[in-house]
Amino acid sequence: MPPVIAAAGERAGRRFFEFFTAEIENRNTREAYARDVAQFLDWCDRRRYRLDSIDPLKVAAYVKHLQESRDHGGSGLGKPTTKRKLAAIRMMFDYLVTGGVIAFNPASSVRGPRYSAKKGKTPVLDADQARRLLDSIDTSTVVGLRDRALIAVMVYSFARVSAVVSMDVGDYYANGKTWWLRLHEKGGKFHEVPAHHKAEEYLDAYIDAAGIASEKKAPLFRAAVGRTGLLTQSRLHRLNVLQMVKRRARRLGLPEAIRCHTFRATGITNFLQNGGKLEEAQAIAAHESSRTTKLYDRRDDRPTLDAIERISI
């Protein structure tokens, strides 16, 4: 329990604990908000602020602190991260207000930095790079088959890694002659999409080798036992997926910045390059707005040689 909350009494502590257990359902959001709020309260504790003494000026000072070192050439936070941290702080104070712990939300009137993105920053692989990565995986082991199937699901369904690792075996299912994927999205929602024939091929090979076809309510993608090549009964964590992706990308000399979200952006870009409609990509990706989908469209990232050769210096 952060000292600032503990010093405010048992009621504040109980309400604070409830915020992260009862109010926030998504595990990833809970972890991110817990870090963001803990950092803010630690900052307050170092300045000896009591919970009831935190006002908009103090919250605004913290927001400025987050970006100050970046503005002076240091390693401060970017605008999107700062806005997320402020949102977490604001939500936490809202919950304390509705629980009668404090009288008002000191973060409600604090404005975050203005930020508007027209193009995402997620690194994208071209079709050849993505194919090389998939083909480079040693599928003589069940772990290799797992990794190939997992990456394929992210590429061919535009899925977030958290949605994929949350899948159970039964979330890959037959609907008539078509196989479908049931993805576990944010807020406890499910999103169902047909399985691309390549994803189907790779999933079938993995499930057959792992011998888990009958375990419908068990995790689909499972953690491995060290480097033994054997799988456990435990669900694979998204951070372990990131480590796996980074390791495999390094071996092929792929961009250092590659991460799990790269496959979401890669799939969407390739889909649009091949004549897919933005509205269809939006539906597959389960985006609320096509503006969000557009952030993943990286078709214009590489200028054509003809365009470059127009420079006649």
Image (tube, rainbow, N blue to C red):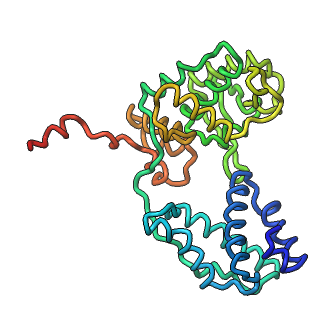
**Among the 4 quarters of the image, the one containing residue 219:** top right
Q: Is residue 35 above or below residue 171?
A: below
Residue at (46% x, 70% y) in the render:
114
Numbered circles on residues, count: 0
**Position of residue 224 measured from the top left corner of the image (x, y, whole percent):** 76, 27
**Among the 4 quarters of the image, the one containing residue 141:** top right
Q: Is residue 42 above or below residue 20?
A: below
**Position of residue 214 measured from the top left corner of the image (x, y, whole percent):** 83, 22
Residue at (56% x, 73% y) in the render:
65
Which quadrant of the figure contains the N terminus? bottom right
**Position of residue 181 measured from the top left corner of the image (x, y, whole percent):** 66, 33
Front residue (pair 116, 31): 31
Residue extending farthest to the left is 312
Front residue (pair 251, 306): 251
**Among the 4 quarters of the image, the one containing residue 213:** top right
Residue at (74% x, 51% y) in the render:
27
Which quadrant of the figure contains the C terminus? top left
Residue at (44% x, 68% y) in the render:
71
**Position of residue 200 measured from the top left corner of the image (x, y, whole percent):** 62, 22
Residue extending farthest to the top is 140
